[in-house]
Amino acid sequence: MKDPIRVRNNLLKNRVVIKLKYLNVGAMYNIKKFLLFLLFILISPMLAFSSDLLTIFKKLPHSEFGVKANNETIDNLAKIVTDPKLSATGKSYLTVNRMGFDVLNTAESINSWVVTEFLEFIKGTKKPVLDIGAGYGHISLTALAQGNKVVANDIALEHLLNIRKFALNKHLSVGQLYLNINSFPSEMNFPNNSFDAIMLHRVIHFMSPQQIIEGFAKISKWLAPGGKVFIVVMSPQHKQFADWFLPIYEQKWQQGDKWPGVNLPVKKALPDQVYNLPKVLHVMDDRPLRLAFEKLGFDIEKSEFISMRHFATKPNERDGKEAMGIVAIKK
């Protein structure tokens, strides 16, 4: 197994030697081109190293749930993963793949009725729980601390390695933690009836209707009878854009559009967050979610708004309808 730190150093050394050997000295007079050249030298080995790191991780022994977090090889990978970076407001962490923001600590992660009910429900369960799009893993870590077997999923390896690091820092049992890097839903597969609970916390507003439909169909198979799925998603009633987007949403819903919240333009809707979000989001309230789950035979146990006022940067910027939560139970 390659030492990741040595791989990084060799990549950097070889990249610089090769590029300097063939450098056209005449380009030195073009400052802009030369600066771009230097930037390429600095960035390209990082990209190559990141790819190499992912390759090493994917070659580790996998169970049906993912890589077991007590695998000693992960210690070497974790040495070169940096701590999460703070957002511009300092109230959250930046995700490394521009998929939004994550809370700073466990206390903030449970400041939601959905998360609270998830954690309460899994106290009496025996099967593993799945946290899709876990980010830096505060929900997963709380479940792990309760004694649950946890499958933490995220498409960013840096997030997964940080989850493991946080678990070790809290002296939690990483033997009960599985790290899963597969993309939901296309790459993710588990045996039927594998889980008692599945969490999608601020995930599906990054997904298309087709991806959501495919994902829910898979969840209906992965959950054991009586199992529950817990969802938090950005709502069209969000005060920062409800005045102009909610009428569009309602009109499309009345016209029969089952997913009327697609393609919310982030630059217009959330200009203060645009630097770490994709160009568009897919917002929704409980109506599309109810239809989708009821079609699959689920019962809707509860749906309510979730306040995210504590992330506001200006007075009266939010009113408690920033997110929608829903809990559905498999019959």
Image (tube, rainbow, N blue to C red):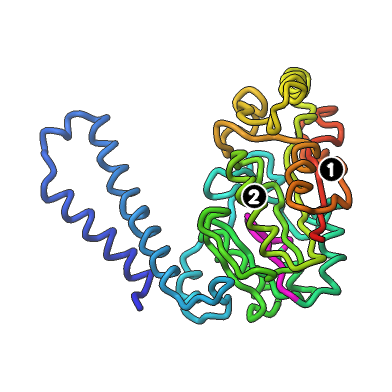
Q: Is there any visible trace of residue 154 in the rendered image?
A: yes
Instruction: Give the side of residue 149 with respect to residue 153, left or right.
Output: right
Between disc 1 and disc 2, whose residue precedes?
2
Residue 36 image offset from top left, x and y in percent: 29, 36
Residue 174 image offset from top left, x and y in percent: 64, 78
Q: Which residue is mark 1?
A: 306
Which residue occupies 82% across, 69% down? 122
**Disc 2 residue type?**
Tyr
Residue 202 image offset from top left, x and y in percent: 70, 47
Which residue occupies 55% across, 43% down? 98
What stretch of residues is rendered in magenta? 127-139
Tag 2: Cα neighbours inside 10 Å, few (<14), some, or many (≥20)? many
Residue 140 image offset from top left, x and y in percent: 71, 65
Q: Which residue is mark 2?
A: 93
Q: Are marks 1 and 2 in contact (CB under 8 Å)?
A: no
Q: Is there any visible trace of residue 241 in the rendered image?
A: no
